[in-house]
Amino acid sequence: MRSKFISLLLFVILLTSACALPAEKPEPKTLTVLAAASLTESFTELGKVFEAQNPGVTVSFNFAGSQQLAQQLDQGAPADVFASASQKYMEAAVTSKRVDQDDAKVFVKNRLVVIFPQNNPAGLQELKNLMNPGLKLVLADKAVPVGQYSLDFLDKAISDPDFGPQFKDNLLKNVVSYENNVKSVFTKVALGEADAGIVYVTDITPGAADKVGKLDIPDALNTIASYPIAPIADSEKADLAKAFVALILSSEGQQIMEKYGFISAVSD
């Protein structure tokens, strides 16, 4: 009888110990996301949301000009998701077979704005002032999406009687540097290294709004930029990559994007 009691007691102890074992931790994984520089703030927040939803997963971002990211993909850089500020560079990723064309989805849109240092050293009052002699202007290089969009704005403006045919040429004479991403343009203007620059409205984040003033570009002259996103076709974490894209396209993801000034491009 005693031996049976001891056996039963040991069984209960083993059973209790088994129940008390800590839950197995999920295997650590890193999801690599290549994203346009203008997505820095919004995607950083979305990365934290994704990590909270997927224990054990760390989202690693590479923020840069879309043209640089597309080139990295073409050269075989490992990645799981690509988000571009231009259809052109998503198409380049499709051409290099890093993205399947059917997987690319436009998730937000953006627009241009002219910014100047808070103390407005050049005394800018209107867009035409951008061609004033001696003004120091910073633009993104034309290979950068926002750089090309800026040139598109100038091409529209020269057909507008309010600006005149010489507006583009006179303005470009004032360019003191062409930057390789939009954040560099914003930083130079905010630091007072230039009198003005052209960026996206989303670059004027709440934390940076007190550093610059702005001149709006009318709808008729503005360029509405479309941002596509896609999982990388050869990603070793295909399920996680698709899940991250799904978060961006979800109502929760879109609300976060709108909080940072982006225009939702996802229909309900």
Image (spheres, rainbow, N blue to C red):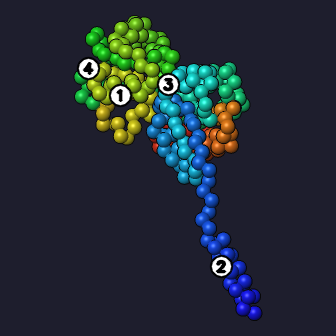
Where residue 158 sits: x, y (%)? 45, 11
Front-most of residues 203 and 264: 203
Residue at image x 62%, y 24%? 76
Distance between mark 2 and mark 4 Cα atoms: 80 Å
**Disc 4 element:** loop
Q: CA distance from mark 1 to mark 4?
A: 17 Å
- Can you tell which of label 1 and label 4 is closer to the viewer? 1
Sequence order check: which comes first, mark 2 or mark 4?
2
Amino acid, disc 4: Ala
Mark 4 and mark 3 residues within 8 Å of each other at the beta carbon: no
Residue 98 coordinates in the image, percent (x, y)? 67, 27
In the image, what residue occupies the spot 53% across and 39% down? Answer: 60
> Is any part of residue 186 visible from this angle?
yes
Disc tally is: 4
Mark 4 sits on what residue?
Answer: 122
Position in image of residue 196 (x %, y %): 33, 21
**Which of the two labelled residues, at mark 1 and mark 2, occupies the earlier sequence position?**
2
* Mark positioned earlier in the residue sequence (1 or 3): 3
Q: Amino acid at mark 1?
A: Thr
User: Which residue is denoted by mark 1 in the rendering?
Assistant: 187
Vertical relation: 18 (above or below) 89? below
The furthest residue to the bottom? 1
Please give left or right for residue 255 compared with residue 208 in the image: right
**Residue 226 at x, y = what percent?**
57, 29
**Label 2: which residue?**
13
Badge nearest the viewer, 1 or 2? 2
Answer with mark 1 or mark 4, whichever residue precedes in sequence. Answer: 4
Q: Which residue is mark 3?
A: 65
Question: The residue tagged with tag 2: helix, strand or loop?
Answer: helix
**Given this view, does label 3 or label 2 mark the residue nearer the observer?**
2
Foreground label between 2 and 4: 2
